[in-house]
Image (cartoon, helix red, strand yellow):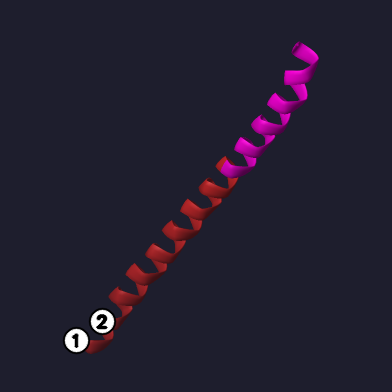
Amino acid sequence: VAFIFEPLWKNLSRRSELLLAHIVLHRKLCNLVAKMFMILEVVYRKGVE
């Protein structure tokens, strides 16, 4: 039974690792974009004043 489940489990764990890495990367990108917008807003406000 173990030799049937082991490859399946390895495949599943690899997929979940990829998914987790993808989510982490996505969150980092979102944070980066949010920071860029904050900086742009500050620059815009200083330009308007």
State if disc 1 and disc 2 touch (CB < 8 Å): yes
Left or right, 34 with respect to 19, comes to left
Is 33 drawn above or below residue 45 in the view shown?
Answer: above
Identify residue for label 2.
Answer: 46
Task: Return the mark for residue 6.
Answer: none
Comparing 30 with 12, the one in front is 12
Q: CA distance from mark 2 to mark 1?
A: 5 Å
The magenta-colored residue range is 1-19
Q: Position of residue 45 (x, y in %)?
A: 24, 80
Q: Which residue lies at the image location 68% right of the left edge and 35% below the top edge?
A: 14
- Which residue occupies the foreground of this view, 35 or 14? 14
Q: Nearer the viewer, residue 39 or 22?
A: 22
Question: Residue placed at 69% from the left, 25% from the top?
Answer: 9
On the image, the x and y values in percent for residue 34 come to: 38, 64
Q: Main secondary structure of the magenta part?
A: helix
Q: Give the crowd class for mark 1: few <14, some 14-19, many >=20 residues within 10 Å.
A: few
**Total residue callouts:** 2
Question: In the image, 9: left or right of 35?
Answer: right
| Amino acid at dot 1 | Glu
Tell me, yes or no, whether the highlighted magenta stretch contains residue 2.
yes
User: Which residue corresponds to the image point at 59% horizontal and 43% vertical from the top-left?
Assistant: 19
Work out which residue is located at the far top of the displayed protein and give it: 1
Q: Which residue is situated farthest in the right direction here?
A: 3
Placement of 43 over or under 23, stated as above or below: below
Q: Quadrant of the C terminus?
A: bottom left
Which residue position holds label 1?
Answer: 49
The quadrant in which residue 33 appears is: bottom left
| Left/right of residue 17 with respect to residue 10 in the rendered view | left
Label 2: element kind: helix
Residue 6 lies in quadrant: top right
Residue 28 to residue 3: above or below = below
Secondary structure of the residue carrying tag 1 is loop
